[in-house]
Image (cartoon, helix red, strand yellow):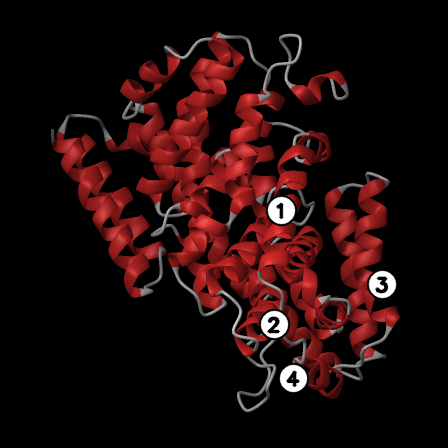
Amino acid sequence: MDIAIALAVSFAGLLLSVQQGWPLLLPLVGALSLISWVYRRRGIPYRQLAKHMQQGVRQSWGVLSILLLIGVVVAGWLIAGTVPALVYYGLKIIHPQWFLVSAFVLTGTLSALLGTSFGSAGTMGLALMIMARGADFPEGWAAGAVIAGAYVGDRCSPMSSSAHLVAAITATNIYRNLQRMIATNWGPLGLSLLIYGIASLQHPLTGTDNPLLASIPTQFSVHPLTLLPAGLLVLLTLCRWPVRRTLAVSLASAIALALTLQSQSLGTVTQTLLWGLQLPPDEALSTIFRGGGLWTMSKVCSIVLVSSALAGLLSALGTFNRIGRWLARWSGQRGRFGGIIAASLLTSAFGCTQTIAILLTQKIAQPQYTAQQASQEQLAVDIENSAVVIAPLIPWNIAGLVPATIILSDSSFVPYAVYLYLLPLWNWLFYRVDCKPLWRRRFPAN
């Protein structure tokens, strides 16, 4: 009973922080402290509690350096003009008759390059929403297409923090995971394009004038060469270079472009890489092109560390064993994936963050996958096809709340983010092909 009360208080604290916009690290530390105190009252020594937390942290420790590097690369892409150029060229190719399809594809493409749903929604997504509002376009459809597109790349990009986190906690190879995620993506992606295509025909955009097309060239030098960092990232990823080396090469090219083509000083570039891009407040683009940097990603890393410690503690002490035993009743591969979907719903609702949803879902599902001799690669792709995309559908989870707030919308986007529904549904319905997951024919486990 005491642990149930502690979990309820922890959930209330997380939910209150999300609703009030407070830093999430504080309620997470509070939850960790409260649950540790409850178990200490039960007679468990502090040393044992610390050991469990350390084991949880150890799982995600290796990914932190990559996350910090990703934050620096995103800042480099911003000051080099790469992200502004992607938005500029993307807005120019939009056809009014196919606005929703364009919104989904463009945001999805940018998220595949940036690897961040928040960054994609805050740049391309916000620009598209400005265009939609100017034409009195249905806001729910526009926001749904934007946020759904933002999570296309969030789950299958070499720049994605969630993809690296899943690979770290399952001890799998990031590139092999990306291959499997792409292979399980085609059906939901095609159906999403079909649905957005039909909706586009029913709701054509009445105008395509966007002030951003005139504003971007005044602040940044827009040139095809500014796309070089993104091109190098794609090319080296296809060549399966080590992730850190790929990110380093992309960052080096971005710094070179910032110093030359964008005429930025070395001090400005260094400051941006450390603290993120911050344009003057009176600039028209200051609310769109901002963020990135070592400091911003360090805050994300702190949340990952505390969440990992909390997940390790809850898992080692059997807090969710009852849920695990309930899920174990779901037999077969399809039933197992149905169980992980249910676990993702619970953890996304309880944790209020995508990070906690990923960590707790892995902890809950791992015994079942081990008992059924399912591979870690299979567990990794199942988490990507469930927890990663289910979290944004929970109205109070920051995975969906933050992007919606960034694009000046609200939870009304949820019914229209069809890709986020179709991905887990599709992979549950078609999980078995000759008793094997769809991707295993092409990508056998190691």
Q: Which residue is at 71% across, 72% downward?
A: 84
Residue 366 at what x, y percent from top left?
46, 20
Disc 1 marks which amino acid?
A: Val
Amino acid type indicated by mark 3: Leu
Q: Is residue 410 above or below residue 32?
A: below
Q: Between 209 and 43, which is closer to the camera in this rendering?
A: 209
State whether residue 155 is above or below residue 79.
above
Residue at image mark 1: 152
Between the residue at mark 4 and the residue at mark 2, the CA separation in whole angstroms equals: 9 Å
Q: Which residue is mark 2?
A: 127
Q: Residues within 10 Å of mark 2 (few under 14, many from 20)?
A: many
Residue at the image position 34 percent from the left and 52 percent from the top: 396
Q: CA distance from mark 3 to mark 2?
A: 22 Å
| Lower sequence index among marks 3 and 2 | 2
Mark 4 residue type: Pro
Calculate the distance from the C-alpha at mark 3 to the C-alpha at mark 4: 26 Å
Q: Secondary structure at mark 2?
A: helix
| SS for dot 3 | helix
Residue topped by disc 3: 228
Mark 3 Cα within 10 Å, few/some/many (few <14, many 20+)? some
Which residue in the structure is indicated by mark 4? 211
Check disc 2 and give the amino acid type.
Answer: Ala
The quarter of the picture where the N terminus appears is top left
Task: State the quadrant of the C terminus.
Answer: top right
**Vertical relation: 431 (above or below) 99:** above
